[in-house]
Amino acid sequence: MSATAEQLVTLHPQVYRGDALPPVRALGTGIAALDGLLPGGGFPRGRIAELHGPMAGGRMTLALHLIRHALDRGERAAVVDLPGTFVPPETWNGGMPPAQGEPDAPRGTAAGRAPAGSPPDLDAERLLIGRPADLQQALRAVGILTRSRQWGLVLLDLTGAPRMPSAAWLQRVGSDIRSADTVLLLLHARPVSPLGSPITLRLHVQRRLTEAGRALRVRVAKNKLAPPEGSVDLPFASPGVPHA
C-alpha cells in the first residue's frame, strides 16, 4: 500500500509537520546523569526496555538500584527470576546487593511477597518475586503481571535462558502495556533481538575502572524515541551501588 505525502501528514501530523511529540511518561532511575540520556528522563512507561552486558558486568546492580528507587517513590515492582539468583531484599544493606543470590529459593512457585526482615525503609509489600521453573512459565507470569496494570516495574531476568522470547510474544506483551504505566525490563547477557522486536530502549552495561575508581559504564545502544547515542560512567558509592 502506497501513500502520498498528504496522506502521511493526515495519518501522522505531529511527525510529518515537525510538531512537538507528546511528552514521554518515564520511570526515573534516580541517577541524574543517566536520566539525562534517557527519553523523558528515565525508562519510558508502557514500553519494553532491556539491560544487557557481560556476566558480572553490572546489569543486575543497575536493575536493583532501579527497583529500590521505584519502591522508594511508591511504585510497585515485580521480579520474574528465571535463573533463581535474585537477591532477596532482607539481605540488602542500605541498597547494596551481595554477590550471591539465595541458594535455597524454591523453583517453579508462583510469585511471592518479599520475605520478612527487609530493611525498615523498604516496603516489601510492594515487591513481588516469582521464581518460575522454565521460560514458558516465566513468560506466562509476565503476561499476567503486565495485563493487571498494577505494576510500575516488571523485571524479567533471562540470564542463562537457552532461548529468547519470540517476536510474537514481545509484540503481544508490548501491546498489553502500551497504555499502562508499566515498564517491562528484560535482563540478559546479549541483546534480545528477534525480527520485529518492539523493544524501545536498550542499554549496554559493563563494569570498568576509571581514574576515579570503579564504575558502571551505561551506553544507550537503542532508543526508538530519540537518537541512540551517549554513555555515562556511574561511580560506585560503595561496592555494587552506583551513586544516586
Image: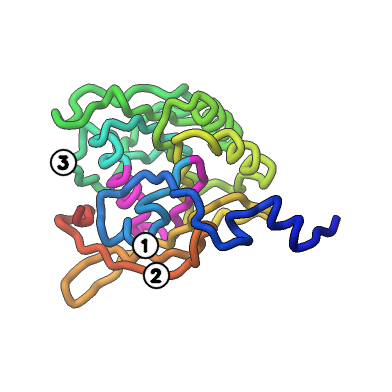
Residue bearing the label numbered 2? 230
Q: Nearer the viewer, mark 1 or mark 3?
A: 1
Secondary structure state at the residue bearing disc 2: loop
Residue bearing the label numbered 1? 37
In magenta, the rendered stretch is: 46-66
Q: Residue at 61%, 37% (x, y): give it.
A: 175
Q: Is residue 142 magenta?
A: no
Residue bearing the label numbered 3? 93
Q: Are marks 1 and 2 in contact (CB under 8 Å)?
A: yes
Q: Nearer the viewer, residue 85 or 228?
A: 228
Q: Amino acid at mark 3?
A: Asn
Q: Are marks 3 and 2 in contact (CB under 8 Å)?
A: no
**Residue at the limit of the structure toward the bottom, as seen here:** 211
User: Residue 163, image x and y in percent?
Assistant: 61, 48
Q: CA distance from mark 1 to mark 2?
A: 7 Å
**First-in-chain label (1 vs 3):** 1
